[in-house]
Image: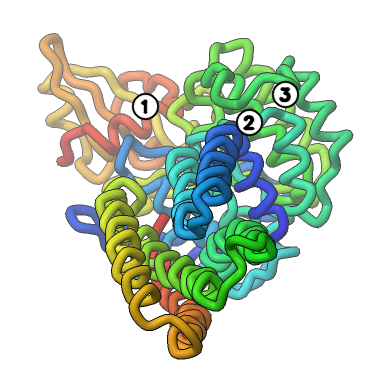
Amino acid sequence: MFGLIIKDFKNVFGMMIYYLILLALFLTITLLSDNIYFYIGAVVFFTISVPLSALAYDEKDNWDKFALAAGVSRNQLAVSRYLLALAVLFPLWLISFLLLLAEDLRSYENLSVVLMYGGISLLSTEIVLPLVFRIGTEKARLLYIIVILAVLVLGGLFAAWVETIGGMSVLIASLCILAVGIVGFFISMKISCSIYRHKDF
Amino acid sequence: MENAIYVAGLYKQFSGFALQNVGFCVPKGSVVGFIGENGAGKSTTIKSILGLVNPDGGKIEVFGKAAPSLLREDKNKIGAVLGETCLPENLNIKDIDGVMRHIFENWNSSVFFAYADRFSLPREKKVKEFSRGMQQKLSLAVALSHGAELLILDEPTSGLDPVARDEILDILYDFMQDEEHSVLISSHIVSDLEKLCDYILFIHGGKVIFEEEKDSLREKYGVLKCTAEQFAELDPSAVVAYHRGEFGMSALVLREKYRGEQALETANIEDVMLYYARGERV
């Protein structure tokens, strides 16, 4: 499993500079505007797009054929893509908590946003990955764009809601979404493993 | 005799094509050449053995164990080359070594780099910058660098020039010096198989036509060049298949049943394959 993750990171390494520039840009905008949405929105984007890029490379290289022939199990192949998403999400999400230490960003509302977007990142990943496994990265590209747009719309609605209501109820709602994201992650992994089990390469 | 691979009654249905009752074995310590035209079912059979395709029926055993129950350590004893490179093209040789160390339990970096040097593969260049031949050599270097006892090679010499092909055949000879080692190799370049193989497995239209010792093919089959009149006098049971040409007839015949007076020409593997695949039947 570790070899698969290393391979993914080495494979997308060429795109890292592009990703890091984008990340730095969103981080700067967040700090200058005191608006957490810019950075946390980028976290969702990276959590989906890094595994998708890695998958697109794998598809082009026929990597799955090699891995299966080498003794990597179908379940490991499926699960490794989720682990890659987590490996991207966790450090970026951790940074968003660190951002909350800044005086102008420190609030229950922003904590709610960070928690909720952690859940949204997980939910987006768990919707997109099984579909990509089923129909391939090329066909799933449209779906990926729809998910990103849906996240933007929901984010806007959520921002309005936070502005209107605020306080503990929003925090509880955010925790609920995060919990749904965590539970859904395991369900999605199970679905993906089943897709992989029945797939011919 | 102990088998490295045993396949019986293998069945796999695709739309417009099916593997039907495919059965053969690769005895331990032998090289089996897998021949057949494009789309005959060679790659599907190989993929079924390697667990890349879920068969609809039949039995596959590797090292005496049912293929679906092979553990990672069993699969690690198989070196596979799958036609396409199947390695991450954004990586260079050093990166690939770093990845394979975590994929194969018995990965041997020094063996891998020795093969890379022997094949003149540049260490800093990305795989996508390699020529097709270099990519094939890299795949073979990976297959030979983790202590494999069985090589399953799907078209390993396709796209290679004769010198590179010869180099790869030499390496396969070296691999076969160990009596525990076995090879299943598919190729369209039948002359390569003539040099290397102990057995020939021929598949046509998803069905195994024969698996024979290479040397017995020459004893079993002959090619007859004759006129239509001479052909008409032949015992039909002696004729496997024939071609009708502008200037006469030619037929693949069973030496054992042939009673004619014309001398038979030696049938090489390619002749046998072509008559079975394209010849007319009596």
Compute the Cα span from label 3 to label 1: 25 Å
Amino acid marked by disc 1: Asp
Q: Is residue A152 positioned above or below B116 on the image?
A: below
- Taking the image as shown, residue A48 lies to the left or right of residue B27, namely left
Q: Which residue is mark 3?
A: B170
Amino acid marked by disc 3: Asp
Q: Tell me, yes or no, whether dots 3 and 2 are on the same chain.
A: yes
- Name which residue lies at 25% across and 51% down: A142
Amino acid marked by disc 2: Leu
Estimate the x, y position of residue B11 in percent, counting from the top left.
Answer: 35, 66
Mark closest to the chain's N terminus, 1 or 2 = 2
Q: Looking at the image, which residue sits at the far front?
A: A104
Crowd tier of the residue under label 3, counting other residues whose Cα lies within 10 Å: few below 14, some 14–19, many 20 or above: few
Compute the Cα span from label 1 to label 2: 18 Å
- Taking the image as shown, residue A38 lies to the left or right of residue B279, namely right
Estimate the x, y position of residue B93 in percent, counting from the top left.
Answer: 72, 29
Q: State whether residue A71 appears in this view.
A: no
